Image (cartoon, coloured by chain):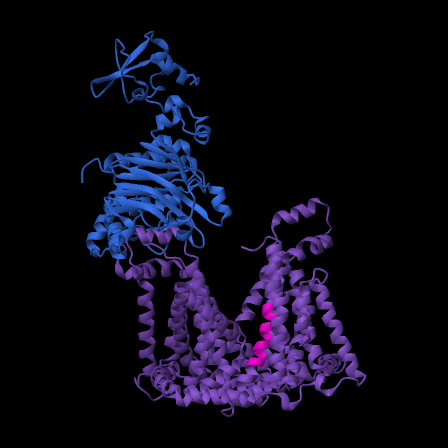
Amino acid sequence: MTQNTPVISCQNVWKLFGRNPETYLATLPIGRGYEEIRADGYIAGVKDVSIEVHRGEMLVIMGLSGSGKSTLVRCFSRLHDITGGKITVEGQDIMKLSERELIELRRSKMGMVFQSFGLLPHRTVLDNVAFPLEMRGQDRHKRRERAMEVVKLVGLEGREDYFPRELSGGQQQRVGIARSLAIEPDIWFLDEPFGALDPLIRREMQDEFLRLQEMLAKTIVFITHDFDEALRLADRIAIMKNGAVEQCDTPDQIVLNPATEYVRKFTEDIDKARVVHASVLAKQDISGTGNPVDATATVHELAQLLVQDTREAIPVVREGKTIGAFRRSDALNILVGAA
Amino acid sequence: MAVLTTNPTASDPMLTRPRAALIMVAIAVILTGMHYAGALPAVLHRLPEAMIPPFAQWLDAAFNFIKDDLGLLALTRFLTTGLEWLLDATANLLFGQRRWPFLGPIPWTAIAAVAAVVGYYLGGWRMALLGGSVFVWTALIGQWKIAMQTASVLVVAAPLAFVIGLTLGIAAWRYAWVSRAIKPVLAVLQTLPFFTYLLPAVIFFKVGPTAGAVATTIYAIPPMILMTTLGLQKVPHEVVEAGHLSGCTRWQLLRHVYLPSARREILVGVNQVIMLSLAMVVLTAFIGMPGLGAKLLAMMGSFKLGRSFEIGVTIVLIAIMLDRMSKAWVIKQPEHYIRGTPWWKRHILLLTGIGAFVFFCILGQFVEVATDIGRKQNFSMGSEIDDIMKWFLALKWVNAITDSIRYVLNVQVLIPFRNFLLSIPTPAFILVIAAFAMWLGGRKQAFLAALFFSLVALSGWWDRSVITLYSVISAVSLALILGLPLGIIAARSEKWSRRVLLACDTAQTFPSFIYLIPAIMLFGITDVAVIFSILIFAMVPLTRYTIEGLRTVPEEMLEAADMSGATQMQKLWKVQLPLALPTMAVGFNQAIMFAFFMVIIAAFIGTQDLGQELQRTLAGTDMGKNFVLGICVSLMALTFDLTILKWANDQKKLLGLAE
């Protein structure tokens, strides 16, 4: 498998809830909407979704509650069996796996963090973290050693003998994170991991999460209902509504070119200058002069330069190579919110 | 049947539920009037003997077929061997019966010490004191041996019920068809009078401890099944998903995720198993199981109230201890130790327990009293208490009070009421019951009520069933008159609510048998004593649910009522009671179920109802008759159960209180 094949790929995936979903899906006319399906007595948890997750990428699935984002991620790990379409994980069609193979896949490749933590109340922190290792039959000494490593990684050293109820919410989620990392998964699912935490702790945990991701470079599917969180963390964002993906793109593109009215509403109150990077504004057909700016800089970071500079176009470099230049006026428009 | 013919018209929009009920009552009144006027044909008053099918014989034939031809008896006798071996072992350990392993009896001091340590582990010093002192009391009052006879069955039956209940509960949760198959059986089992458990146990498992253990086990299984299923259903789905993603196999998921997460409900189930086992094991006295129950039965039979009272206290103490300890276990949470705590410190209580046990066992070898308190050494005050009681009851004013209560109730209320019920023609009676079910529940409930009571009529035990029902209705009515005001008044203050609830909780743990003691003490062997014992037993759930219903009315609604300028009375009538009513109805329902249970036990005092007949069947092998009688009681109880619970659930939905 090459670097470029997607880790998770799903094609026209459907997940319907109701009495007889398979038969219903087979007879479903193309283009039937969410409300019409609902009138027929079915709920479209996931509605004709095609999406790919690439190696080392962080895909954030964003949507309001009931939009189907949690259902979709549960289809990826086959916690839900899908009604139609195809999901492949590392090239394997997961609907074709036997129970044994599925368990093997989860034991070796997948980790998941849950919104309300999903910790086992009768086990200590260390035993909770070691749980996936215990399930795959690792011996006691080895698994405790490994669990201890991850506990240290998430900064819970010294609390390893505590029981979950003796910890704060943030600490409990650290245990959840440690548990999901214990088997060194390739794919990491996070289902609104910071949703149950208060805003200050949430911010702290996001920083912690970014630090971990920098160290571990996993393939990540991250679910949130918080658009700011999505912008802050994502490589790409998929915005869901009524089971379908409205738009899937980089944060810059979503902010600059919302595909639908629904997406645009989300972007309305966002300070675009903090999201849009120089690289996105750069166009190859124009050339600038003078000192270039770095491709990874946001418009907001360039604010002072943009206001004081007098150049028409400013060149952009990525890793020493010029990739083009952007019009200063475009950037200024974003900065003052006119774009 | 008249009800069935009105059913099709009930869909008529003009014929609302109350109206249909009213019409049915009217027909019943007309029928009764005709009977009084002598215009009713005898066939419509009571079913003639000739028309009663011989259910008992049919059942007997079926039993014989299963028992002998299908070889069930051989199977149960085989199972008996294993059970007997276990019971012999516990009997040897606890009271020194000469059987394998020939170690016992364990000195009472050792058991008391271990109980204290276990109590300390579960609930600190207070529980330790409770655990230790209950056993010390039992030994000092001279009831150690009979208590241990009871305990030897209990320690076998309760774990057995736990294991079977847990297994069935898991099966019912896992497979929908098991759940569907089990539900109606559980509903009937919970309303079946206990005598109906006893006789099959005797026939299939020999008289004595084995039959006692079997009956106790079966009796205690249902709540364990329900609590297990409930607990497993309540495990948060994220915890389950975390288990899946940790790569659990099905077995690992059940063993490591589901069962530990359902710990709380499972332990509540354990608490109920223990309490029901205790209640039943005392009642197995009726089939000759030696122990506290048998002694109590004998003492009450010979009117030795002092000794009865002492045994009653022992049973109550044991019940409270078992209840408090198992409840403490429910809420006990694991605590972590600081890293590096040495092994002996982590297990200090285990070591203390073992140490104390060994110490007292050795001590018992040298000091006789530490093992066994002899007849002359105990502190039983049986005859003294007898004297005091006799003196008290003979006091002029006490005598006057009990006598007048007895006279007024018996002559003015109970007997006329009973005669009135008996005078109602059978079809009219069924109509009234169906009307009640129609009014509260609906057409389905009315149909079932009519069906169930018709079956009772067909059983040929109509008059005795009516007498049973009369006891239940009179006792529950009296319980309402006393219990509701008590609950309402107690609910007014936080402090009193807590106290009365604690009293109810405690009273509810007592084995039902106990309630006979004060009844007999005060009113002797009369109808009033029967009603009185049912009355106190039924009052407990009534008061309890009234308080709970009133106290759980949301604070905001009370504040809204206050701000609307409601007086205390208005608030009670317009806000609290309507909202509390569904919960109170659940209490009312439980009161009726308790009453049906108690009325059968009260047969011991001497009644003329189904219980009396049931008790008689125990002497023989009259299994068919026993079942017919038992099912009569069960059908009557089920009618009320279905109707009232339906109403309570409808109301909860209407008020938006249902989950």
Please tell me in which quadrant of the rendered image residue A282 appears. top left
Say which residue appears at 63% left-offset and 91% top-offset: B50
Residue A249 visible within the image: yes
Q: Foreground residue, B432 or B481?
A: B432
Residue B515 visible within the image: no
Q: Foreground residue, A17 or A146?
A: A17
The quarter of the image holding the C terminus of chain A is top left
Which chain, by letter, is blue? A
Left/right of residue B275 with respect to residue A180 in the rendered view = right
Relative to residue B129, is residue A285 depicted above or below?
A: above
Q: Foreground residue, B643 or B352?
A: B643
Relative to residue A27, is residue B345 depicted above or below?
A: below
Relative to residue A217, is residue B173 depicted above or below?
A: below
Q: Which residues are magenta?
A: B631-643
Residue A316, given in percent of the width and then of the height, sits at: 27, 16
Which chain, by letter, is purple? B
Q: Is residue B418 magenta?
A: no
Q: Is residue B632 magenta?
A: yes
